[in-house]
Image (cartoon, rainbow, N blue to C red):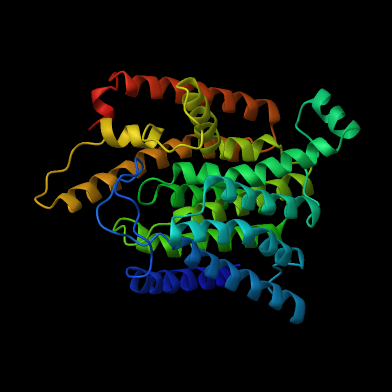
Amino acid sequence: MIWLSVIAFLTAAFAAGGVVRWAHGHTAAYGHEMPQRFHLGNVPRLGGLAMLAGIVASWGLGGLVSAFWGDPASLRIGAWAGWWLVALLPAAFGGMAEDATQRLTVRYRLLLTGLSGALAVVVLDLHVPRLGMPWLDALLLVAPWLGWAIALLAVTGLPHAFNIIDGYNGLAGMVALIVCLALAHVALQVGDRGLAALLVATAAATGGFLVWNYPRGLLFAGDGGAYIWGVVIALASLTLVQRNPDVSPWFPVLLLIYPLWETVFSIYRKLARGVSPGVADALHFHQLIYRRIVRSVFHEDMSRRMLKRNNRTSPYLWAFTMLTVVPALLFWSNTPVLMALCVLFCVCYVTAYLAIVRFKVPEWVRR
């Protein structure tokens, strides 16, 4: 498993270096009027291409070793890993097409992530077998199509949730890396080595991208990178729960509650203002932290000043993520506790959001 992660890391890191060198003159400039833009200059947004290269190389090699050499490392990567790649490609290519052209509308990107979700349900037979509540579990037995619908929604929606939190150097990438390792840890606890191997390789590929993304900001993940994280993590979460009855279905929910609730709250916030949920704005939680909590940086060069302030924003959200990851790992089989922690996070998020909006953040937080 370690050698697989080394291959994923090196492949992604070298591919990212190639993208940085080549894409400066070949990628459409990101509009300066975009509200979510918090950098100066034209930075390539094809980090997803590098991560896809690392994932394909590591997953493919792991599958070949398992198939032709008798699986000496006990990776247990079967043909299903190839079908994971098939399900991943529509969303990944759609996101990278948007990164390269800036012309693929939200509607078409949603259709492509939906195609990835449909492939996951039809080809991989992924579904939600239980929800941890007797009456809902009974309903799933009577109407199994609800489990397929939830799986379709998860694979379709999670890529866009990661795209929403992908606003500053290292933010979405580190969240994805932490979540992948947490899922891999529980997969190893229940003996699912094949799933753990794919997740560790994905985390390593993300690390190879982060070499160029944080703190220097030479390469962005873009929509392609966010969609890759979302699809892989959604597939892994569904597979982990479906294969292993001991794992609570609320374990991945608590792990991912930050991007999930950010998405739900953003939709509510925009609808309350009479704005379409598909319209980008600069009022997400991480953007408020950038504007109202992170201290201003003094530097003669404006781009360097913005870059340093950008880099100081992400650690706040990494810590915020760990507040859910740690208890999720401690109580991964305890559904009532996980559900209560999900509710607690949502309450804390809204409280913190309102405090920032109303300028009521304690002084020690801003230091």
Q: Is residue 255 left or right of residue 250?
A: left
Find residue 333 and report its image quarter.
top right
Which percent across, then down, holds residue 266? 48, 30
Count numbered badges in the picture.
Answer: 0
Q: Which residue is drawn at 67% across and 34% down?
A: 250
Q: In this view, does 51 lie to the left or right of 69?
A: left
Can you name the residue that lies furthest to the bottom here?
68
Asked whether the viewer can see residue 128, the reply is no
Nearest the viewer among 201 and 220 is: 220
Find residue 84 and report its image quarter.
bottom right
Nearest the viewer among 180 and 145 is: 145
Above or below 319: residue 272 = above
The quarter of the image holding the C terminus is top left
Q: Is residue 16 left or right of residue 7?
A: left
Q: Which residue is drawn at 51% across and 33% down?
A: 277
Which percent across, then down, holds residue 37? 33, 46
Asked whether the viewer can see residue 124, the reply is yes
Above or below 100: residue 32 = above
Q: Which residue is drawn at 48% across and 56% down?
A: 98
The quarter of the image holding the N terminus is bottom right
Can you name the residue that lies furthest to the right here?
142
Nearest the viewer among 209 and 113 is: 113
Which percent across, then down, holds residue 117? 69, 50
Which percent across, then down, holds residue 320? 43, 35
Find residue 312 and report its image quarter.
top left
Q: Which residue is drawn at 30% across and 55% down?
A: 215
